[in-house]
Image (cartoon, rainbow, N blue to C red):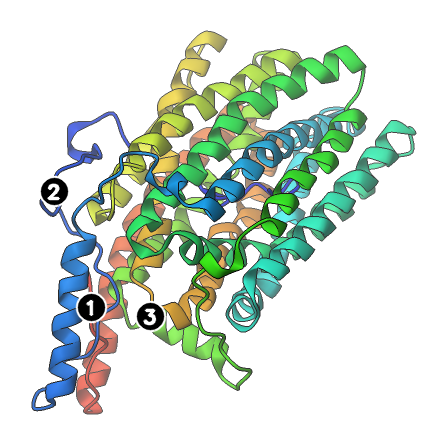
Amino acid sequence: MSGATVLAGDRVMLEGPAMPTTGLALCDDPAPPRGETIPGPRVPDTKGDAGAQAAVKVAELEEQADAVPVKGGMFRSLRNHNYRLFASGGVVSNVGTWMQRTAQDWLVLDLTNGSAVALGVATALQFMPQLFFGLWGGVLADRYAKRPVMIIAQTIMGLLALTLGLLTVTGTAEIWHVYAMAFALGVVACVEVPTRQSFIVEMVGKPDLTNAIALNSSIFNLARVVGPALAGLLIYALGGTGPIFLLNAVSFAAVISGLLLMRKAELNPSERVPRAKGQLREGLRYVLDRPELLMPVLLIAFVSMYAQSFGMTIALMAREVFQAGASSFGVASSAFAVGALAGALLAARRVRPTKKLIIGGAVIFSVLQMASALAPWYPLYLAMLVPAGMALITVNTAANAAVQLATSAEMRGRVMGIYVLVFTGGVPVGAAVLGWLAEFGGPRAGVMIAGALCLVGVGLATTLTKVITRRRKSRAAVHGVAPAPGGAR
């Protein structure tokens, strides 16, 4: 649903981006999962205050209810009329998105004679706006009605795809055009992504939130299977990338139509937050004071710096190492997506993710990324992409759901703005570094180092969470302020 901006799991692969190991498998157990369950937002326990104590009891009962899987199966969110429209439009639009993403990478390589640096710059520019405007996007998501904001944003993204398509078809496209379009898409995504992420709960409610996020990831990755392969075939058949951008522009009509046809009475909009000073700082303090938010946010910040550029490494490995053509490159992207789709479908069975699931998925992805750099044959490389896709989508989906479930409604837009910022904000740095490493050390070296840095990032995230939490609790104790409730248990 967002041009060439591949985020996810929803896009927040913002999308977002279920592991084949027993310790990390998702299940349907009615009992709370083993490991450390990510808690939801809780009310402070003010002893002596009967009202506050009653509120605490209600919050605890709600949290226990959240830990029990909701009846209805893997596709239960599709019972909701508005979500069905949202998901149906997403199928069409996401196929267009992945077609454009594949075509954009191929166009950059064509315009620059296979420059890895240019490919890294294009990816970096697409995500760079998050560094400057990402937090403000979250504030706007809390301040305005989400559905109209999404309609406007999707329309702008469709027009950008149309413009790039016309430039390419007419033979006037230059590399700076691609850079400009990538940056413009990134600016729009600063508002669209946190708005879309926080809009999901307004459609399906909190009990089905994790399921809806996982189904979004499934749709996204189903499109990731179909889109790149279809784009590769069309690039070969039509002799260029221009028609791909035009098809993506048309695909935006599906998601815009779905938004327009929704039943407003069935939405559960959160109360809008009026304009006030200090809203950004309030959002940051909210995350820092809650370990159940801080851990997944920090982990995504470190891991996404190199993991979310994995699609770029697929293009480099396929073309520069294995000398694959456009159609074979599409198969490589689809292989990764097959694993991601399987992981997303498994995630749809669970109500609440665990900390072990998030950390374990990140570790396994990092190891697989390093292993893929050593693959001597293209078929073996393709085979490694499948479990890598499962691991990455596990991290993305579980972290996304954990953050939203642990956030109160009035803070969700700002918290998701922070989440999207760390999810995509590190990509410009990671993509530029990865492009430079691949240019001067070779694609294999770049992929290997990126995987190692992801693994280091997992350790840093868990360590920093403990350090920051300990210091803030100590500071609160010194000043006689009660620490924020909740926390990973």
* Quadrant of the drawing holding the N terminus: top right
Q: Residues within 10 Å of mark 1 (few under 14, many from 20)?
A: some
Q: Residue 27: image x %, image y %?
A: 18, 34
Residue type at mark 2: give it: Pro
* Rendered residue at 66%/17% (across/down): 232
> Mark 2 or mark 3: which comes first in sequence?
2
Residue type at mark 1: give it: Gly
* Rendered residue at 78%/32% (across/down): 246
* Rendered residue at 45%/42% (across/down): 9
Q: Residues within 10 Å of mark 2 (few under 14, many from 20)?
A: few
Q: Secondary structure at mark 1?
A: loop
The Cα atoms of the two marked residues, 2 and 3, are separated by 31 Å
Q: Secondary structure at mark 3?
A: helix
Residue behind mark 1 = 486
- What label does residue 30 carry, if any? 2
Task: Note whether 439 is above or below 80 in the view shown.
Answer: above
Q: Choose between 269 and 235: the one closer to the eye.
A: 269
Residue behind mark 3 = 288
Q: Residues within 10 Å of mark 3 (few under 14, many from 20)?
A: some
In the rendered structure, are the residues bearing label 1 and label 3 in contact, judged by CB atoms less than 8 Å apart? no
| Snapshot quadrant of residue 480 | bottom left
Q: Is any atom of residue 370 visible in this view?
A: no
